[in-house]
Image: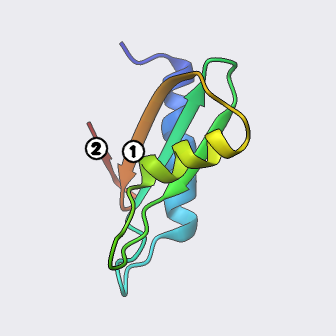
Amino acid sequence: MIDNNDLKLIEEAKKVINKNFDEVDENHTVGAALRCKNGNIYVGVNVYAVHGSCAEYIAMGTAITAGEREFDTIVAVRSPKKIIP
């Protein structure tokens, strides 16, 4: 069941990909938002390169860098419009 906290997380993922979407080269096409057990939210976008990285991994890495270790929920949004299950 999706609750208001989940909807907020989806909105954060939409915000980060809307801000960084790269339609020309398609280097950044997915945005992710991760909520930690303490309620903090971290976001990331995918990075296409020789060895690219998924938006989810970028969000997790950002959270871990900030000292987080307990995660609750993660969502991903492709381009500005499609939610990825």
Could you classify mark 1 by the number of other residues whose Cα lies within 10 Å: few (under 14), some (14-19), or many (20 or more)?
Answer: many
> How far separated are the C-alphas under marks 2 and 1?
6 Å
Q: Which residue is drawn at 37% across and 73% down?
A: 48
Task: Report helix, strand or loop for mark 1.
Answer: strand
Of all residues, the one furthest to the top in this rendering is: 1
Residue 25 on image: x %, y %: 36, 86
Depth order, front residue of 4/16: 16
Three-letter code, disc 2: Ile
Residue 49 on image: x %, y %: 37, 78
Image quadrant in which you'd find residue 78: bottom left
Residue 39 on image: x %, y %: 68, 22
Could you classify mark 2 by the number of other residues whose Cα lies within 10 Å: few (under 14), some (14-19), or many (20 or more)?
Answer: few
The answer to whether marks 2 and 1 mark residues whose Cβ atoms lie closer than 8 Å is yes
Image quarter in which the N terminus is found: top left
Circle 1 is placed at which residue position?
76
Q: Which residue is drawn at 56% across and 47% down?
A: 61
Circle 2 is placed at which residue position?
84
- Asked if residue 20 is positioned above or below residue 39 in the image, the reply reads below
- Asked if residue 69 is positioned above or below residue 14 in the image, the reply reads above
Image quarter in which the C terminus is found: top left
Q: Which residue is drawn at 37% across and 87% down?
A: 24
Of all residues, the one furthest to the right in this rendering is: 66
- Asked if residue 73 is positioned above or below residue 19 in the image, the reply reads above
Residue 80 on image: x %, y %: 41, 59
